Image (cartoon, helix red, strand yellow):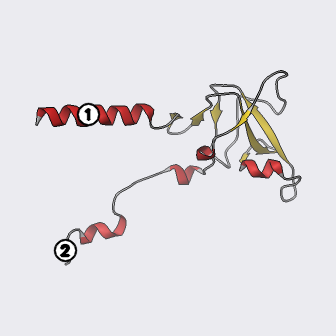
Amino acid sequence: MAFDLKWTTALAAALLAGGCNRASADDGWTADTDTAICTDAQGKRLPDDRCRQHRVGGGMAHWYFLRRGGIIPFVGERARGGSFRATGGMRYQTAPASTAMTRSAAISRGGFGSSARHFGGARS
């Protein structure tokens, strides 16, 4: 039993340490490299494919440049700590596709949902 507990604890710790690059539950993700994200004129994040188009609805989409270690916000939230102007000589990568989600999509509760009340074969 003690052997199984050590492996379970070690596996859980490894998954938590290497699972994702989140800054905190409220901030978004931390950029591993100098990163460009797509924003509207007010600095709210848009999906990156919007910046590859010329116009977004009635407004423009702009690249917003974050340095390594900056916070990559959720889609629809304001970008901070960067600039609409790229720093000369820097090479920027677009944010990983896994970061392009809204805050509500980032909340995962797992579990069985409404089917939990029918666990197993017996139903009441």
Type of the residue with mark 1:
Thr
* Residue depicted at 67% across the width and 39% down the height: 95
| Residue in the picture at 35% in, 69% down | 114
Foreground residue among 69 and 27 = 69
Q: Can residue 41 be seen in this view?
A: no
Horizontal side, residue 114 vs residue 117: left or right: right
Q: Write down the quadrant of residue 32 in the picture.
A: top right
Name which quarter of the figure residue 90 lies in. top right
Mark 2 Cα shell of 10 Å, populated few (<14), some (14-19), many (≥20): few
- Tell me whether the residue at label 2 lies in contact with that at label 1, contact meaning CB atoms closer than 8 angstroms: no
Residue 57 in the figure: left or right of residue 93 = right
Mark 2 or 1, nearer chain start: 1
In the rendering, at what x and y percent does residue 10 appear? 28, 31
Element assignment for label 2:
loop
Residue 9: image tag: 1
Please name the residue that numbered disc 2 is placed on.
121
The answer to whether any part of residue 32 appears in the image is yes
Answer with left or right where residue 100 lies relative to residue 108: right
Tell me the distance, in whole angstroms, between the alpha carbons under discs 2 and 1: 31 Å
Left-right relation of 118 to 33: left
Q: Residue furthest bottom?
A: 124
**Image location (x, y in percent) of residue 75:** 66, 48
Residue at the outermost top position: 89
